[in-house]
Image (cartoon, coloured by chain):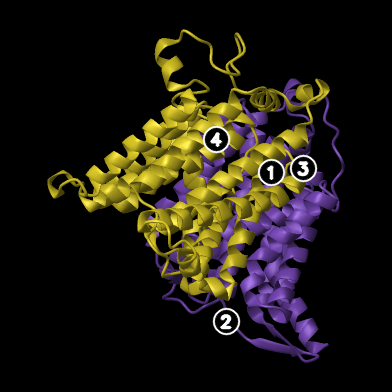
Amino acid sequence: MKGFLVALAVAGTLLFVNGVFTGMLGPGLAMPPYLLQVLCLAGINITLAVSLNLINGFTGQFSIGHAGFMAIGAYASAYLTVTFGDRLRAALPFLPSFGRESVVLLLALSMGAVLAAIAGFFVGVPSLRLRGDYLAIVTLGFGEIIRVFILNIDAVGGARGYSGIPKLANFFWIYLFAGAAILVVYRIVHSSFGRTLVAIREDEIAAEAMGVHTTRAKVISFVVSSAMAGIAGGLFAHYLMYVHTNSFTFLKSFEIIIMIVIGGLGSISGSVLGAVLFITLTEGLRQFAQYRMVLFSLLLIVIMIVRPQGILGHKEFVTFLTKRRRSLGDAPGASGDE
Amino acid sequence: MTTFLQQLVNGLSLGSIYALIALGYTMVYGVLRLINFAHGDVYMVGAYTGYYLSRRLQGSEPSITSALLVMLGSMLVCALLGIIIERFAYRPVRREARLTLLITAIGVSLFLENVAQLLFGPDPKFFPSLAPRTDFLVAGVRLTSEQITVIVVSFLLMVLLRFFILKTRTGKAMRAVSFNLDAAKLMGISTDGIIAVTFALGSALAAAAGVLIGMQIPKIDPLMGILYGLKAFVAAVLGGIGNVPGAVLGGLLIGSSEVMVVGYLSSTYRDAIAFGILILVLILRPQGLLGRVRKEKV
């Protein structure tokens, strides 16, 4: 009951902030559209980073095909709203228009999440038997295969891109789902199943010897992570109203990797920090656009040399400041990595 | 039948390029157990060095000598680049977790791509023709002089490499390092030196591939290394990573199958086929065609 009230309060606050930002509660308070868009894209990136961190940071499996699952979510949900959106709205005459749009969006997002999860399952089962670098390359390959297949489906625009998607997502929905993603990952990581995942990260062979069904645990975390990427993709599509397969190349996957590596693999607040830093830097350096990626790649190399665990390491922001509590997975005396 | 033979020739010449790049992946993996993500970008730098060198030499008629000069120059530049990458990016993290090494490699790759976009401009450039060109017709199959050059040159380079690895002292040391780095060090082998040599050799081969692709498909751009690099990596895995003849076999197989898919199915799937092969190999025979199984010891 308490959790429900907290969730309700958070949703209410978000709705209020959304109203302020979009100028619904007086145009003087409205946020400049450009800043609002940056803020919304940051929210989507937070969802992506937090979800990828579940598999890369906590389970210790290196996946670089996250953009593929995002693409599935984006296209599947967009297809649903574009093709069946009107029929759905007609079936709900008793709801106010806000409610109708919400139902359509939620249905579309769930469809994106389910399809991305199914894809995650079929990618995960064969590839998660592989370790380290091989897994990285296979996920990269799957990401590209997904992209090429979508590119060849004419019903969703093919090479022209998919346009005409209604703008259903806004600040409220994006941050609601970002919060949900953080909550889900937090709850998973702090459950006994989460400790299983961390055990796999620390030493897969030892975990297996202790009776952990490693493949099953890895596949579950992969599927959950893919589903969240699918939701992020759906929000992305319904926020920008246009998607093209070029937005989901492996460069997008690399961007998400950069976010979680900078913030700290195995730290939820680190992922949030990394996503926010990444967006701030990309937008802040817009006038030096051509130097931007040079800077990011150098930053990645330097961080790997100087502080391979990222800014926050395995710690969460709160524990990082107070150091009262040892964070999850930090064995005494261990530096944290493998 | 003639169409099939024609496709096969095209496939072999593309495949030799993949094979040359795959050799670099396999050699580096052999000594460091690292997938050198930046290798495809070294190949791109090789192509650009070739482009600028041949622009320099363009006053003279296209001749075999100038082509040779361009190729050697570009191989030298990339060998240096390989050594620099190893020294400043990979050596500091060599003892860290494998994941750290992998992320560093991704960082180096992104760095090279973006610096190349700054230096060379993001638009594709057109490679000038280096050698006089003629076409031959053998049994209804058209062979361009470029294709013959590509196949002959890459074959020569691979034979040279094999000789180097099997018959020289440095090659022997390289095999020792790839067998067991720590034991090799205890035996008095300068492992740092050998690793640097490995990077130099692999990068030089990639540069040769870059110049050869410039002769065959004369359009080069700063992001060309990504896809070629990935496909060459697939070739290395297909042949059995760490295995030199395997890389060549894998390269030829990937090149031919790609050309066949484009010829008989659809060109939109040309980039998916390599990954499809990779996934099949990793599921059915993870050690590759010629690789041996390594047991993991605790």
Chain coloured purple in this rendering = B
For disc 2, the marked residue is B132
**What chain is tagged by disc 4?**
A
Three-letter amino acid code of the residue under disc 4: Asn
For disc 1, the marked residue is A135
Three-letter amino acid code of the residue under disc 3: Thr
Measured in 3D between alpha carbons, the distance from the residue under mark 4 to the one under mark 2, in whole angstroms, is: 55 Å
Chain coloured yellow in this rendering = A
For disc 4, the marked residue is A53
- Evaluate whether label 3 is on the same chain as label 2: yes
Residue occupying image coordinates x 73% and y 40%? B30
Three-letter amino acid code of the residue under disc 2: Pro
Place of residue B297 in the rendered image (x, y in percent of width and height, measured from the top left)? 83, 26
Residue occupying image coordinates x 49% and y 43%? A48
Measured in 3D between alpha carbons, the distance from the residue under mark 2 to the one under mark 1, in whole angstroms, is: 45 Å
Quarter of image, res B252: bottom right
- Evaluate whether label 1 is on the same chain as label 4: yes
